Image (cartoon, rainbow, N blue to C red):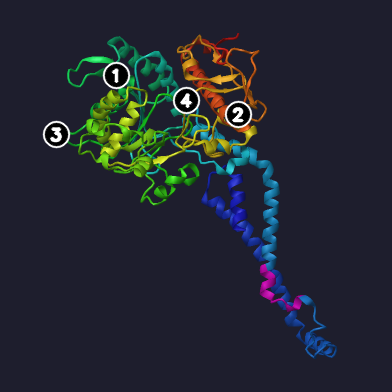
Amino acid sequence: LGTTALSIQRRTIDGATTTAALSSTLSTYIYFPTSFFSNMLRRATSRRSSSKDHVDQTKSKRSSYGRNGNGARGRSWWSFIPKPLVGTLLIFSCGAILILISRLTSRGKRADNYENVRKIAVKNILPEALPLPSPGAAAKIHTPLHPVGITSPATNATLHIIFSTDCGSFQHWQTYLFFHAALKVQQPGYVTRIASGCTDKELSEEKEWHETHIRSKMSDRFRVHFTPHFSGVKDEESGEVKGDYKFFNKPFGLKHFLEYNDLMGFDESGKEMKHPDDIIILTDPDFLLLRPLTDDFSNERETIVGNRRKSMYQNKETHFVTHGNPYAQTYGLGTQWRKFDLDAIAGPDSPAKAVDQAEAGMAYPAGPPYIGTAKDMYKIAVTWSDFAPRVHKQYPHLLAEMFAYCIAAAHLRLPHMLIDSLMVSSVGTGGEGWKFVKDIPAGEMCSFSASPNHIVHPVPSVIHYCQRYAVDKYFFAKRKVPHEIFTCEHPLLVEPPIDLGSGKYLSVIPNGKPNAKGKEITAEKEKMEAFMVCALTKATNAAMVSFKTNHCEGGGNMKQTYDMWAGKNVA
């Protein structure tokens, strides 16, 4: 009865739990049935008392017909049941009937109740909030009723999500998309772009653009931090610049941010960090957030750990990021860093040299998102900045700075807990969160990925869109995105059909060649490729619409006519 009353209460008062209403409902559904059956029992008892002589006479007559002289054959079957149990059974029967009535009558009200929940959410949370689930999933809604803050919901530590860029137009549009996605998923904490190497003119323009288009329209938690130019490849002995490696901006930019940003920095002595317990989440600009990044990995529903690391995960004292306990995404870097000349990079006495093959593969092939306390991340930033040029000298290729990070972490004896589900990037690659994608029903793939809801289906934290993604004639690649998409004039992207990923499109047709024979793909690959194409296309369009709505007179060009597959406007 209590369950029934509570169920009715929640469905009739729009989710606003009030003690008076609940008390009234409970008293209505518990008092009246109890009172009714109590009166029945009292009347029955009274009648039995007033006709005792008649009952005794009846018993005497019946006993002569009994099988063994105890009168069992002559008594009615219900007389064997203890009288208090009769009342209890009647009360529970009444409760069951009330539950059935409640279930039948509430079906028609669920949609209305869901709309009431949606109205409350829209009224109280930031605009462009994460889409709510369908009415069938209304019972699972946990909508925050307050603006997103700067701290972790789990630990109350201040969060800093940072990403490093240059001042070019290629990472300019990625920056806007990153901030818009952070707004959409209600990312807690400060979100800061670290922009390195801007000219005076570029710095002035970027400051104004950030203020006009991001901070004032999205959130004052969204910031920009400018640093000097770090990407020059210098000779360690002469200091002469011999080339350019733009990924130096990541370790040096992180170090500069932790030392000089007004949210961080050191005390007057220059020896102690002002906020060593803050959490730093270092990401890349080509990340699309699907759900908030935090310092909490305690929920196994949303945390995938590779089989070889499950015991490491299960044996940890805490699944929160703490001092000496950083987390990161698993990357396919293996143990290659051990093959470098570690004497030249880290010194002959470096602790990194004592890391064996097993530990090197277990705790150090880490990549972004890197998540650690400010204290730990500053140690890493200093050492990483020292090692990166030396690694690049031995290995002048794309991943030099990532190998330098592995060596720095090993040198500092800071093993990382590596998580698979922080990211998806290369379709089907092991060590990424593709299990979540594969578990999404094929018929929902495009519609769900276009508006992912972690409550309905768990999703990876981010898409790292550093690859090419294609199904049939639908395509997305960051290097094919026009740099001027966030303008009033540029049209929106052509969106894929809603059934992409359903098993209907089992080929990839070469870009811009409609008559070419398609390359066959499996249904599973179609699902994963469709997830990426649909999510990235829809998110980019949503960001473009937001830009045009906020900054373009008349709303700007809202036509979906730029075809990424064809590489042109098809209007």
Residue 261 among those drawn in magenta: no
Q: Which residue is mark 4?
A: 465
- Which sits in the foreground, 184 or 417? 417
Q: Secondary structure at mark 2?
A: helix
Residue 138, percent from left and from top: 59, 41
Q: Which residue is mark 3?
A: 269
Specify the amino acid type for callout 1: Ser
Residue at image coords 62%, 36%: 441
Residue receiving disc 2: 526
CB of mark 2 within 8 Å of CB of mark 4?
no
Examine the image and state in which quarter residue 112 appears: top right
Magenta stretch in the rendered image: 78-88
The reply, left or right, for residue 377 in relation to residue 471 is left
Q: Nearer the viewer, mark 1 or mark 3?
A: 1
Q: Is residue 30 above or below residue 205?
A: below
Residue linked to disc 1: 231
